[in-house]
Amino acid sequence: MSTLNVTRITLIPGDGIGPEISEAVKTIFAAAKLLSGISGCSYDLKIHYDHGAPIEWDTVDITPIKSASGKYVIPASAFESIKKNMVGLKGPLATPIGKGHVSMNLTLRKTFNLYANVRPCKSIDGFKTPYDGVDLVTIRENTEGEYSGIEHTVVDGVVQSIKLITRKASIRLAEYAFQYATDNNRSSVTVVHKANIMRMSDGLFLKCFREVAQNFKHIRYSEVYLDTTCLQIVMDPSKFDVLVMPNLYGDILSDLCAGLVGGLGVTPSGNIGFDGVAIFEAVHGTAPDIAGQDLANPTALLLSAVMMLRHLELRSYADLIENATLDVIREGSALTKDLGGAGTCSGYTKAICDRLQNSS
């Protein structure tokens, strides 16, 4: 028997349906023999030490707390867990309106310098949408732009919000995007911008990408206005491969691209940090109206966890879980309501576990 190497992952279940879909992911990982001891799962889940490193979950609460300075911050236990483990999986988080604290999603990005948000958008065989054969990736700058949080009142009735673009962040994102394209056998990188209007800010962003593009001659490079991109992408998504953009544009365009393949419920997402921290997440809402009713769809969080496994170089497990999930979607009998079926979260989870057991 080989030495057991345990990969610890910080798990942030989140709010609303978050705990349910997090449990579904844990159960499916168990069925893939990535860990043992999951309560409520009836499968034989002995760890196969010779078949790779198991995952061990470190579950934390990320409900914001008020610091001595009056700012809302991440609880110390959650902060230390993420810093120690370097990799996290996060369910959806709610941001109460008017409660005085900022989005914990935004706080996580800034706290851990999660500068690149990566969202693959790929058509799922058997899950029909108006578009077929979509296969593109959006990479969004995650730490500055219009979401820098720099706002103030000029005079009564007039507010100003500052868009921050820096060379450091733009070069960093460009290098990541071209390297991602190289590592994932992508042929082109397209930068989405509005430098015709925001000449200095988006102009600097473009200048940095043009500079980095010189080191990746094997990747086709292009620049397209944001409005033109939106027009072209709904007419023919196949024109694009890897799309890269500043923060606000990415927030909008990544959701548009998710809509091409069926919505946020089937779209994975990962956030990559400069110092090695990475947090993978479901980017859909908390769906409080169906929380606790066994109606939630765990696909987005599960496919985000698959991205996480590939990040950890556990590619065989990633392929196993992804293939089982796509097989269940293709077969169609266990789908939840938002996927076009009438099934439950637990039934969908069991169908994937059964598929994994049959493939082992």
Image (cartoon, rainbow, N blue to C red):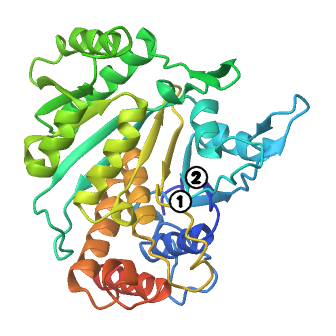
First along the sequence among labels 1 and 2? 2
Across and down, in percent, residue 146 comes to 49, 27
Residue 39 position by quadrant: bottom right
Q: Quadrant of the C terminus?
A: bottom left
Residue closest to the eye, 332 or 23: 332
> In the rendered view, does 67 fall on the left or right side of 157?
right
Q: Residue at point 78% right, 44% down?
A: 75
> In the rendered view, does 357 fall on the left or right side of 239?
right
Q: Is residue 180 above or below residue 346?
A: above
Give me the disc on residue 15. Answer: none
Q: Are marks 1 and 2 in contact (CB under 8 Å)?
A: yes
> In the rendered view, does 3 fall on the left or right side of 51?
right
Judge depth for marks 1 and 2 and give the one in front: 2
Give me the disc on residue 9. Answer: 2
Residue 266 position by quadrant: bottom left
Q: Which residue is under mark 1?
A: 55
Q: Residue at point 56% right, 49% down?
A: 88
Task: Name the secondary structure under disc 2.
Answer: strand
Q: Is residue 339 above or below residue 239?
A: below
Across and down, in percent, residue 241 comes to 15, 40
> In the rendered view, does 107 fall on the left or right side of 32?
right
Q: Residue furthest toward the front?
A: 157
Residue 106 position by quadrant: top right
- Per the model, the C-alpha gap separating discs 1 and 2 is 7 Å
- Three-letter residue code for mark 1: Ile
Task: Name the secondary structure under disc 1.
Answer: strand
- Three-letter residue code for mark 2: Ile
